[in-house]
Amino acid sequence: MLGRVNHIAIAVPDLDVAEKSYGETLGAKLSPRQDLPEHGVTVVFVTLPNTKVELLYPLGAGSPIQSFLDKNPNGGMHHICYEVDDILVARDKLLAGGARILGDGAPKIGAHGKPVLFLHPKDFLGTLIELEQV
């Protein structure tokens, strides 16, 4: 079911510092900032030869990233995103196997303009997993 790793997301308390760290210090190519109000985040993608790193910064008062940063003030890994061919087939197979889908179970459009779902971390060794249809 799983395809390649699409990205690893890191919640950051200061997006300017994170961009400087990845862009200037590590010499990585950065995307422009993208506000995603429906997800409560501002994202910047670090493009690597084999995958991407997503820098997540809170957008708005109800941001789930702010909740994460309240518990982890220095930031840290937030989730890993895997690609799937058909998100509805993947969802249905996961539900049949007892996995929990966060939210209402309906895919939402993610930062790449493609359908995404998040899987409950308690079902996957404490790791929040995002699935993205490719």
Image (cartoon, rainbow, N blue to C red):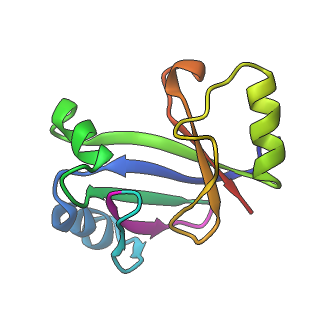
Which residue is painted at 62% across and 26% down in the image? 100
> Residue 72: x, y in percent?
21, 33
Which residue is painted at 61% across and 47% down in the image? 117
Above/below status of 33 relative to 129:
below
Q: Main secondary structure of the magenta part?
A: strand
Q: How many marks?
A: 0
Is 94 covered by the magenta stretch?
no
Nearer the observer, 23 or 76: 76
Which residue is painted at 16% across and 58% down in the image? 14
**Image quadrant in which you'd find residue 15:** bottom left
Left or right of residue 100, residue 97 in this image: right
Left or right of residue 14, residue 102 in this image: right
Above/below status of 26 relative to 3:
below
In the displayed orientation, state which residue is furthest to the bottom. 32
Q: Which residues are magenta?
A: 40-50
Left or right of residue 38, residue 94 in this image: right
Nearer the observer, 63 or 122: 63
Nearer the observer, 96 or 58: 96
Quadrant holding the C terminus = bottom right
Quadrant holding the N terminus = top right
Is 45 covered by the magenta stretch?
yes
